[in-house]
Image (cartoon, grey):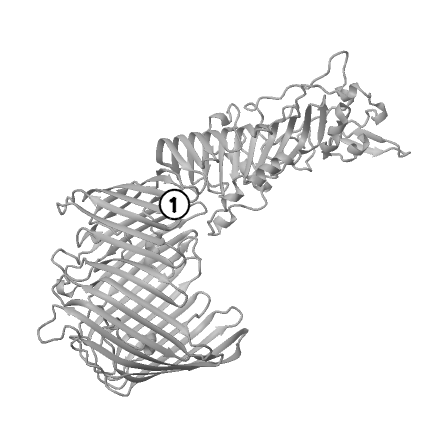
Amino acid sequence: MVSLLHFNRGRSALMLCLGLGPSCLLAAASDWDCQRSKDDSEWVCVTRKSKSETAVTPSDQPESKAAEPAKEFEPATDSAVARPEVSRPPRTREPAPTAKSELKQGDRPIRPAPPKSVAAAKPSGWTCRPGETGKEWDCSLVGPDPQGLARVVPEEGETTENWAETTTITQEDEQRFRKLMALLPADPWARACAGKSESAPMTEFLMTPQDRLARQQQPLEIRSDYAEMVDDEIATFIGSAELTRADQKLWGDFVTHNTVSDTLNARGNVIYQEKGLTFSSDTGFLELDTNRGVLRNAQFILGTIPARGTSRLTHFDSNTLSRYEKFTYTTCPPGDTDWMLHARNVKINKETGRGSAKHAWLEFKGVPLLYTPYMTFPVDDRRQSGFLTPSFSSTRVRGFDLTIPYYFNLAPNFDATFTPRILTKRGYLLRGEFRYLTEMTRGRLFAEYMPHDEVRGDSRGQFGILNDTRFTDNLFAHVDANYVSDDRYLNELGNQLNIVDRRHIRSWGQLTYVGTNFNVTTLADYYQTIDPTIPPAARPYYRLPRVTFNYARGIGNTGFVFSGSSELANFSHTGGRVTGQRLNVMPRISYPYQKAGGFIIPSLSLQYTQYWLQDQPPGLSDSPSRTAPIFSLDSGLFFEREFQMGDTPLLQTLEPRLFYLYIPDRKQDDLPVFDTGEYDFSFYQLFRENRFTGHDRLGDANQITLALTSRMIDQSSGMERLRASVGEIFYFDDRDVSLPNLPQRPGNKSNLVGEVYSRLTNTWSIRTGGQWNPEDGTIDRGQIALQYDDRDNHLFNVAYRFRRDQNLDLVRLDLTDVSFRLPFAEGWNAIGRWQYSLLDQVTLESFLGIERETCCWRLSIIGRHYINDIRTSEDGGNVANNEIFVQLELKGLTRFGRQIDRFLERSISGYRLEGDE
C-alpha cells in the first residue's frame, strides 16, 4: 500500500491513508526521484539535489519510529498569495527532509525552525541577485510563480506597507485578486463590462436546505504533495494541499486537520471557496462542524453580484453570521477602484438578510462622498426597514429639491414609506405612502402635504388611492381616486400620482362580474378640472353610476352569432348644464365566415337609445329617444408569394379589404351630448361602424371603404421588413349628423389615408403616414419618423408632425422632434432632445446631457428646459422652467440623485429601462 501511494507522487490521496493510522507516512515530495528496482520488487528513491546520498528503499525504513513524525511540526515556508500550481519551477531551497531525517537523534526528535510571523513574511514572487561570477543570476521563489507579474521592491531602508493597518485595496491585494480570478469558471465581470448588469439570482449565493444537507453527509476529501498522520488524530498536509467537502474547498501550502475536534488550520497560499464566494488569505482556521472560522488579511470575490473586497480580519461565527474588520468593498473589476466602500467593522447576517457597518465612508474617484458612524443595509432582496437613497434636483420653480425617504417594513404584506422633502424656494413638504397586499386585494394609499408654500402663502397637497380587489374568480373591483389642492400643484410641485392628463384629473371605480358568455360592469367616475382656461360649462360630465351588460354566443351549429350590449348611465354636472339618465340597447346578429384565403362578416344591429332629462330647455322633450338599424359587411382576401432578394428569403402579402356600412339618418339635434366626441380619423377609423364615441350620436352612413395592405416578411427571422397601407371611404349620401357647433362635412370622399413602415436594417427603421384631402387639395395630416436603435439603448430619432383641423380649417400642430442617446467615446454617451413648435415658434422642451458608464458605475448629468403649457395665462402658465438632473449609480450598491431612467423612457422613443426586453 505504501508503494502504491508513493507511485502517486505529488498528489497523494488521504482517503487511502486515514485507515492505516500512524504507520502511513507519505514522503513522496517533488524533490525525490523514484524508480522500480531491477527485480521489480521495490522502489528505489534518491533526492534530486544530492545524487551521492544512499538510496532509500522501503525495507531500509524503521517500521515504528520512522512513522512517528514530530507532533509540533510546522514547515518553514513563507506565505503566498494564491493557489499553488501543480507544476512548479525549480526551487533553490533545500528539499523536504527524508523519512530518515525525521527520525529521533538520541531521544529527541529534530524539528524544523518555526515559520516567520505573517507580518514579517517575505513578499511572494521571484527574488534575483547577481551570482558570484557576475555572469549568472541567483534566483529564489517565494510562493507560486507570478508568471511575469511584477511586484514593487522596496528601496533599502524602506518598509513595506503593513496590511493589518491598511484600510483600502493595495497592490498586493490586486495581485491576489488576479490569482483568485484564475480559479473561477468564468470572469464574473464579463457580462457587466459588456453592458449586461443584471446580477445572478440569490439562490446561487444563499445556502439552501440541500446545500446544508450535502455539507453534513459528504465526506472530506484531501489531497496534497506530502501528508502525515499523528495518533489517528492530527493530519498534516504540506505542499498544494486541497480539501473538498460539498461546495467547500480549501487550498494551502500547510494544512492541519484535527479529526477529533474536526478543525482545519491553514497557512501559506490559503484559498477558501464556497457557493458564490471565494476567499484568499494569509492564514485560515475553520471548525467544520460549526462552520466557524477566522481568516487574516483576506481578499474575497462575490461572483454572483459581481463584487470584491478586502477584510484584514474575518470571523465566520456560523453558517449565516460573519464579521469583518477594516473592510473595503467594490463592484469594480480587479485593477479598478473607481469607487470603494470602507468600514471599520461590518457584520452580515444571511438569516435576517441584514448587514450593519460602523464608521463607514464611501469614496468615488478618491473623493469621499458620504460618511456615517453607523449604517444598516440589505444583503439580499428581502425588504428591510431603513433609509432609502436620497434624491435631489434643482429647478427654477422649486429651487434646490432634496428628498430623504425612510422605508418601514411593517409586515410581509404591508409596508410604508415616509419622505420628508425640502424645497428651498417653497418650504418643506411631507409625503407618505402605504402599500398592502392580501389574498383578495392589493393597493396603495398616497398623500402629500405642504403646510405653508412660501410663494403662494397657503397650504397645499394631494391624495391618491389605487386598489384592486378580487372577491371571487368572477367578481373583481378596481378603484383609482386622485385629488390635488389647486390647479397649479402638479406643475409646480411634481406629479407623484403618475397623472397623464394635465387638464382633468379623473377618479373612478368599477365592479365587474364575468360569466360564461356575458359580463356586467358598474362604474362611477368624477373629473377634477385643473386647467384654469376651461370654463365651468365646458367641463366634462361625471357618471354616478353607469351599468353595462355585454353578451355573445353562437346560435347552435348554424354559424350565426348573437351578441348584444346595453348601458344605463346617470350623468351629473356642476356647471348648470342638462343632466339626466340614458339607456342604450343594441342587439346584434352576425355570420362570420373565415378561411385561410379570406373572410366575409355580414352583421345586422338595432340601436335603441332613451333619455330621461332634467333642466331641459323649454320646448324640448324631457324623454327623447332614437331607434336606428345598422348594417355592415366586412370582407378581405389574402394573397402571398415567396421570392429571394439577394440572400434573404422574403414573403410578400397582398391584402385587399372592402367594408360597407349603412345607417339611416335619424334626427338627433334634440339629444344632449353627455360623453360623446368624434374619433380621431386614421386608417383604422375606415372600418368603424360609428364615427362618434359614446351613444349620444349615431352617425348616418351609406358608404364603402376600399383599402389595401402589403407586407414583406423576412422568412429567416420573421421580421416585418415593410408594411404599406392605403385606404379611402366613398360616400353614397351626404352625412347630416354632427356634434353641436361643428359644421357638416360635405363631399363624397374621405381623406385618402396612407401609412408606411419599413425596417430598413436591423438598426434603422422609418415610419411615415399622411392624409390627403381630395376636396381642398391639401394635406390635413402628415408625419415622418426615422429611428436608429441598436437594441443597446443607443438611439437616434428625428420626427416631423403636422396636423390641420378640418372642421375649423386651422393648423393645430406643426413641430419637429429630435432625440438621441449616442456614444461619442469609449464609455461615454451624449443624451438630448429638442422639440420645437413651428406653429408657435417656441421650444417646447429641450435637454442635453452626458452619461459615463463603466463596469461598476454610471453617472448622468442632464440640463432641461421646458414649458408646461403653451397657452398664455394670467398666472404665467407659459413661463419656461429649467431643471438639472444628476444621477450617480454605483452598480451593485445604490444610486445617488434623482433617477432619470423613467424620464428618458418618456422622452426618447425606443429607450428601455434596465432589465426590459
Is residue 913 placed above or below 84 in the rendered structure? below
Q: Which residue in the rendered view is the most extreme toward the bottom?
A: 732
Q: Which residue in the rendered view is the most extreme toward the front?
A: 556
Quadrant of the image occupied by residue 71: top right
Q: Is residue 684 visible?
A: yes
| Position of the N terminus by quadrant | top right
Residue 665: % across, % down: 23, 83
Residue 812: % across, % down: 22, 70
| Position of the C terminus by quadrant | bottom left
Residue 544: % across, % down: 22, 61
Quadrant of the image occupied by residue 235: top right
| Residue at 68% over, 37% down | 86
Residue 529: % across, % down: 18, 59
The residue to which callout 1 is attached is 889
- Could you tell whether 685 is left or right of 428 in the image? right
Q: Is residue 679 visible?
A: no
- Could you tell whether 605 is left or right of 578 in the image? right
* Disc 1 residue type (three-letter): Glu
| Residue at 49% over, 31% down | 321
Is residue 103 placed above or below 426 in the rendered structure? above
- Could you tell whether 12 is left or right of 522 in the image? right
Q: Which residue in the rendered view is the most extreme toward the top?
A: 107
Q: Which residue in the rendered view is the most extreme toward the left?
A: 618
Is residue 577 placed above or below 621 in the rendered structure? above
Label 1 neighbour load within 10 Å: few <14, some 14-19, many 20+: some
Total number of numbered labels? 1
- Identify which residue, 737 or 101, lies in the foreground: 737
- Could you tell whether 790 is left or right of 797 in the image? right
Secondary structure, mark 1, is: strand
- Identify which residue, 320 or 333, lies in the foreground: 320
